[in-house]
Amino acid sequence: MSFFLASKLRRASDTVAIEKKRDELKSDFEDFENFSKSDELQHFNELETYVLSDKFKNHRKNIEGKSFKKSQLFQDEKQFKRFQKSRKFKTYFKLKDSSELTNYNQLNESDELIRFKDLETLVKSSSFNKKEQADKLNEYKRLKSSARIKEYFKFGKSKALRIYQEVEKSSDLKTYYQLEEKISSDDFLKEKEFLQDKKRFEKTKEYKKLQEYQQLKASEKFVKFFKLKHKNPFEEIKKWELTFSDEFDTNKLDTTKWTTRYYWGDKLLNKAYSLAGDLQSFTDGDNIQVSGTSAVLQARKEKKDGLLWKPNLGFVPQQFEYTSAIINTGNSFKQKYGKFEAKIKLKNHSQVQNSFWMVSNKILPHIDVLKTANEGKLMFGNFWGNEKSPQKNEFKVKGIDLSKGYYIYTLDWSADKLEWKINDVSVKIIKEGIPQESMYLNFCIAVKNASNNLNSELEIDWVRCYQMKK
C-alpha cells in the first residue's frame, strides 16, 4: 500500500468527524429536497422571474423617468396659473362678485331703467312737444341726473365691463373652470405629489416585490439553498436508495432481520455449527448484547458443546473451549450490486478473526468487506470460482489504528467493479471476479488460536445497504 494512501487513512481516522460530515450532508440534502418543493421557493422563483423581466425593468424605468415638469399635470397647472395671472381674468374675477356689477345687473332689469329708456326715446323723437309733454321731460331729466342712472351708464361704458363680458362669453372661461376642478381634485394632488417625490418608485407595489425578493435572496435559508444548488454536493446521495438498515436502537436483536447461526445451519439443521479450524461454538444470541445504540458480538473463553463441520465426516459433536457470535441476513435480505457498509469497533482484535463478509447461496462467491487475521492484520478480499478451482484476490491495508474505535467500512459493488472504502477513503478497486448474483451480510468473531485471557468484541453501531436508483 502506498504512503499516500496510508497518509489519507490517517487523516480520515476521525470517524466522528466523518460521520458528522455525512449526517450534515444528508440533513442538507433532505432540507434541500424539501425546500426545492416548497411554496416558499415557488413564490421566490415567481418574484425573481418578475423582477428580472423586461416588463418590470421597463415599468421601473418608466416610473423613475417621470417628472412633474414633463407631465400633462404640469401643463394643466401652468395653463391655469396663466389664466389666473392674465389681466382679463383678474378683471373678470374682480368684477364677478363686486357691488358694481351687482348694481349694474339689478338696474339693467329694473322698471326704472326701462322707464328712463322709454322717456329718452320719446324726448329724442321728432314728435316730442316740450310744452305739451313738459311733465315727461321733467321726469326724464330727473332720472337722467340720478346717481344710479349716471353710474349705470358710466359702468356700462367701462373697459372693465367690456372685458368681463368678453370673458364671460369665451371658451377660455369654460377651460378655466375645468382646469380649476381638475387641479384641485384629490387625484391630481396625489399624482402631483407622486411625480414630485424623488423616491416615488419606493412607494410602488413593484418596489415592495423587489424588496421582498432581495430580502429573501439574502436570507440565510436562501443563501444556503443556492450555495448548495451551485456546488451540487448531492450527486452521490441522489444515486442511492436505502434497502436495508439496522441502527440497533432497541434493547434486543431484531430477529426478523438477523439469524444467529450460519444461514445453512439454520436452514437445514435448525442448529448452529462451526467450521473446521474454528475453536469456538456460536451460541444462539448468548454472546450478543444490544444496548439501544449498538450490537456487540463477544468472544469468550468458556466451554460449550456444539457441532463442528468436517468435510470428510460431516457434522461432528464437539466440546469447544470458547464461545462466540455470528449474525447474518440470509433469511431476510439479499442484494445484487449496491453499497454495503457498517460502522464497526473492534476490541482486542488481534486475539480473534473479526469478519464482515458477504456470500451467495453457495460458498463462492465470497467478499470480505472487513477481516482481521494473522495477529490483527486488516484484510480485504474477493473470492470466486468454485470449490475445486477457487480464485481469490486478497490484500491488506495499513495506516489504520483499530484500537482507536469506530471506523466505517464500505463496499461499492457494481456489475464490473468492487471498491473497498474505510471512512470514505478508497483503499482498493478490483475489476476481476465480480459476483453476478445476490449476496447476504454476515458478521462474526472466529477464534483461531487458543488464548487464556480471551476477551474480544466486534461492536456494530449501524448497518446500511443501498441500491442504485432506477
Image (cartoon, rainbow, N blue to C red):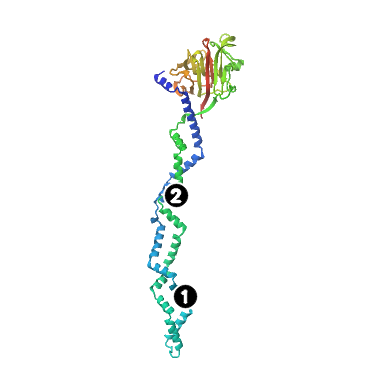
Q: Nearer the viewer, residue 411 or 324?
A: 324
Q: Which mark is residue 203?
A: 2
Answer left or right for 470 relative to 130. Answer: right
x%, y% of residue 217?
A: 45, 40
- In 3D space, how far apart are the residues under numbered discs 1 and 2 (Cα atoms)? 55 Å
Answer left or right for 345 relative to 90. Answer: right
x%, y% of residue 174?
A: 44, 66
Can residue 344 be seen by looking at this rendering? yes
Q: Residues within 10 Å of mark 2 (few under 14, many from 20)?
A: few
Where residue 139 sits, quadrant-wise, is bottom left
x%, y% of residue 420?
A: 47, 21
Q: Residues within 10 Å of mark 1 (few under 14, many from 20)?
A: few
Q: Earlier in the sequence, mark 1 or mark 2?
A: 1
Q: Can you say which quadrant of the picture contains the N terminus?
A: top left
Verify CB contact (< 8 Å) between mark 1 and mark 2. no
Where residue 251 sits, quadrant-wise, is top right
Q: Which amino acid type is shown beneath numbered disc 2? A: Lys
* Residue that mark 1 sits on: 106
214 vs 26: above or below: below
- Which tag is nearer the camera, tag 1 or tag 2? 1
Q: Residue at x 44, y 49 (%)?
A: 203
Can residue 365 be seen by looking at this rendering? no
Q: Residue at x 42, y 82 (%)?
A: 145
**SS under mark 2:** helix
Give the farthest residue toward the right.
Answer: 270
173 vs 66: above or below: below
**SS under mark 1:** helix
Total number of numbered discs in the rendering:
2
x%, y% of residue 42?
A: 49, 40
